């Protein structure tokens, strides 16, 4: 897995610094990352026209491979479609406070009903 550390745009030249962690165990497969892999992770706001500088990185150290590298691309910036302006959040309706005197419930509680059934069964 590779990730972009630094991404700078100077005119029409995009400079991308990328790194990959070392494979610490044998379960992690050895992998070399080249230009096509870096192009896949570059954000969609850029259109790559050509590669100016390439590099190769890998997740292992055998053969003196490095874990970070730098690529330079000539790019065309793609216009990002503008979204509609956000609306102001709706204000919550004010609730009326409960009256001080409330009527008692006409339904007996579940505990009361269960007690009543138990008493009727005993009789």
Image (cartoon, grey):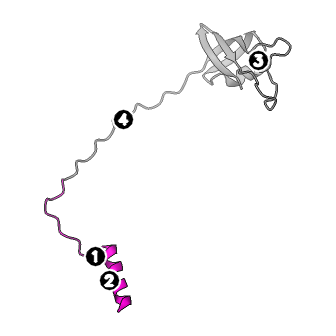
| The quadrant where residue 39 appears | top right
Q: CA distance from mark 1 to mark 4?
A: 48 Å
Q: In terms of depth relative to the viewer, which is nearer, 11 or 64?
A: 64
- Which range of residues does the magenta coloring cover? 97-123
For disc 2, the marked residue is 116
State which tag comes first along the sequence, 1 or 4. 4
State which tag comes first along the sequence, 1 or 3. 3
For disc 4, the marked residue is 87
85 lies left or right of 76: left
Q: CA distance from mark 4 to mark 2?
A: 56 Å
Residue occupying image coordinates x 36% and y 35%: 87
Q: Residues within 10 Å of mark 4 (few under 14, many from 20)?
A: few
Q: CA distance from mark 2 to mark 3?
A: 79 Å
Asked if the stretch drawn in magenta spans residue 64, the answer is no
Q: CA distance from mark 1 to mark 2?
A: 10 Å
71 lies left or right of 100: right
- Point out the frontmost of discs 1 and 4: 1
Q: Are marks 1 and 2 in contact (CB under 8 Å)?
A: yes
State which tag comes first along the sequence, 2 or 3. 3
For disc 1, the marked residue is 108
Q: Residues within 10 Å of mark 3 (few under 14, many from 20)?
A: some
Asked if the stretch drawn in magenta spans residue 121, the answer is yes
Question: Measured from the top left, where is residue 22 in percent x and y?
Answer: 74, 21
Q: Residues within 10 Å of mark 2 (few under 14, many from 20)?
A: few
Q: Are marks 4 and 2 in contact (CB under 8 Å)?
A: no
Residue occupying image coordinates x 64% and y 19%: 4
- Point out the frontmost of discs 4 and 2: 2
State which tag comes first along the sequence, 1 or 2. 1
**Circle 1: element type:** loop
For disc 3, the marked residue is 35
23 lies left or right of 63: left
């Amino acid at each position: 897995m590779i990730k972009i550390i630094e991404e700078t745009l100077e005119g029409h030249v995009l400079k991308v610094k990328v790194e990959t962690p070392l494979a610490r165990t044998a379960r992690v497969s050895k992998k070399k990352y080249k230009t096509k892999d870096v192009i896949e992770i570059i954000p969609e706001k850029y259109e790559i026209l050509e590669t100016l500088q390439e590099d190769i990185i890998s997740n292992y150290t055998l053969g003196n491979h490095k874990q970070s590298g730098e690529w330079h691309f000539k790019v065309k910036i793609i216009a990002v479609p503008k979204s509609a302006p956000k609306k102001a959040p709706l204000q919550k309706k004010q609730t009326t406070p409960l009256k001080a005197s409330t009527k008692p419930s006409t339904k007996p509680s579940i505990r009361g009903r269960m007690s009543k059934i138990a008493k009727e069964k005993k009789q």
